[in-house]
Amino acid sequence: MTTTNEQITPAAPKLNRHFRLQWEEAQHCHVLLYPEGMVRLNASAGEILQLCDGVTTVEHIVATLEQKFNTTGLRADVDGLLAHAFAQNWIV
């Protein structure tokens, strides 16, 4: 039996309160800070996680990013990142 990302990712993901997302000017990227360390994010991950506020749905995250970057077909990429973020406990 397989599961899809939609089955394990919250409908309206938010950052785990143990992580803080911020822009790190010295590294020119977003990072996730937590008491034991830091996760350096690529540009796409930073864009997606900025929209994880616990209110915005995955569908709205996809639509927002597709509009912002004037493209379509981002659902699989967003689902993939959110599944990874959920598995890493970055989002709840």
Image (spheres, grey):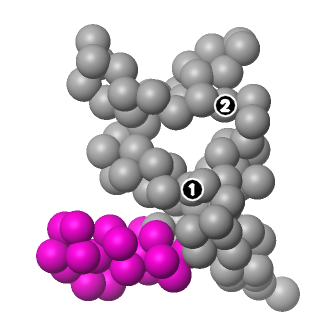
Query: x, y (%) of residue 13?
Result: 66, 61
**Badge 2: residue crowd in 10 Å (few <14, some 14–19, many ≥20):** some
Residue bounds of the magenta highlight: 58-77
Q: Is residue 58 above or below residue 43?
A: below
Q: Secondary structure at mark 1?
A: loop
Q: Magenta segment: does it hold 69?
A: yes
Q: Quadrant of the C terminus?
A: bottom right
**Badge 1: residue crowd in 10 Å (few <14, some 14–19, many ≥20):** many
The residue lying furthest to the front in this view is 55
Query: x, y (%) of residue 85?
Result: 63, 51
Q: Secondary structure at mark 2?
A: loop
Q: Which residue is mark 2?
A: 19
Query: x, y (%) of residue 73?
Result: 32, 84
Rendered image quadrant of residue 26: top left
Quick check: marks 1 and 2 in contact, CB under 8 Å?
A: no
Spatial CA span between label 1 and label 2: 12 Å
Q: Magenta segment: does it hold 65?
A: yes
Q: Amino acid at mark 1?
A: Cys
Q: Quadrant of the N terminus?
A: bottom right
